[in-house]
Amino acid sequence: MALVGRSWLLLIGFILFYVIYLLFGALIFSTIERPMEDKLRLEVEVLKQEFLNQSCVSAASLENFLFKVLAANKYGVFVLKNASATSNWDLASSMFFANTLVTTVGYGHSTPLSDTGKAFSIFYALLGVPFTMLVLTACVQRLLYPLVLAPVSLLQRSGLEPRPATAVHFVLLLFLVVLCFFLVPAAIFTKVEGSWSFLDGIYFCFISLCTIGLGDFVPGMQPEQKYRTLYLGAVMVYLFLGLMMMYLLLRTFHKMSDVHGLTTLLQLPRCEDSDPDEDREPIVDHAESPQRQTEKGASNHLEPGSQVSYNTINKG
């Protein structure tokens, strides 16, 4: 029980540090990029006024105006007044950018303007991406037993053979993921964004949770959107939970493929078999007690077929 308690504390510590890391990145990005964005906005506004004050517009002036406008648009600064009301580098937007950076979603709707911001993005992602993968892996490891191993064991105790049990479980889990992380969020995005259709919402969910991140649909970009900070925070939580469930779904499919012999047929590596107790232990090793070391030493002499795994769940 002590190991289980320490592992949960470690997981909570990981998540808290992850949030602090996002806040730290948001503050740095906002500090570096906000002045550059304000300067670019001012240049575009001055250029716009100069363009409007000209009595006769020349071809060179028009080309210069369009070049500046398109360059500013690339960095999320728009010449239209109603589209430039919100900064791309306030604290909420900076944290959203940091979240898309470390989760590798990367919509590309806003990018660093300065060389300092670009350099910091490299080092921030260098640490943030593997740490995010570590946190996701730790969370999935905690969910593997209650959402995968225990339900499959329950289905087998109800009379199903291992192969049908794993198939039924995977279909049920897939249905829940599609419902809770695609259909329901798509309906919410359609309601909140206003200009999005339901298909646009599903498209955004799929592109985001597959970490494709094309950037043609980005939440929270509507002018004068209500509760924008809270909304962006909710989207960040959705992305983290969605990526976690997608990873869990992939792990479940891999384990089901092991049971059905698909990995053997295609000569792919099998998913690591682990017993339920190990799934509750932390992924970061602690100092082991002599009793635990003795148990592990004894288990090394067991035959592979005698070890408890996803593939050998009790049928009775």
Image: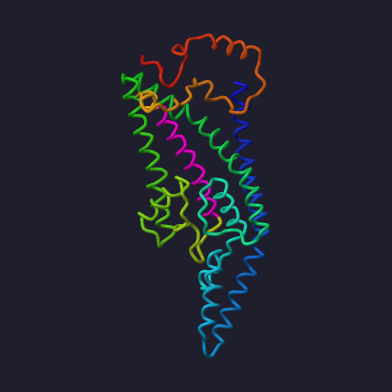
Nearest the eye: 103 or 191: 103
The residue sitting at 66% across, 53% down in the picture is 119
Q: Residue furthest bottom?
A: 55
Which quadrant of the rendered structure holds the C terminus? top left
Main secondary structure along the magenta-highlighted residues: helix
Image side of residue 196 versus residue 300, left or right = left
Residue 127, by quadrant, is top right
Q: Position of residue 18 (x, y in %)?
A: 61, 42
The residue sitting at 54% across, 37% down in the picture is 136
Image side of residue 300 versus residue 28, left or right = left
Q: Position of residue 199 (x, y in %)?
A: 35, 54
Q: Is residue 126 above or below residue 46?
A: above
The residue sitting at 62% across, 70% down in the picture is 40
The residue sitting at 61% across, 10% down in the picture is 294
Q: Is residue 298 above or below residue 29?
A: above
Image side of residue 61 versus residue 257, left or right = right
Q: Position of residue 163 (x, y in %)?
A: 33, 23
Which quadrant of the rendered structure holds the N terminus? top right
Nearest the eye: 57 or 9: 57
Region in magenta: 230-255
Q: Position of residue 145 (x, y in %)?
A: 47, 26
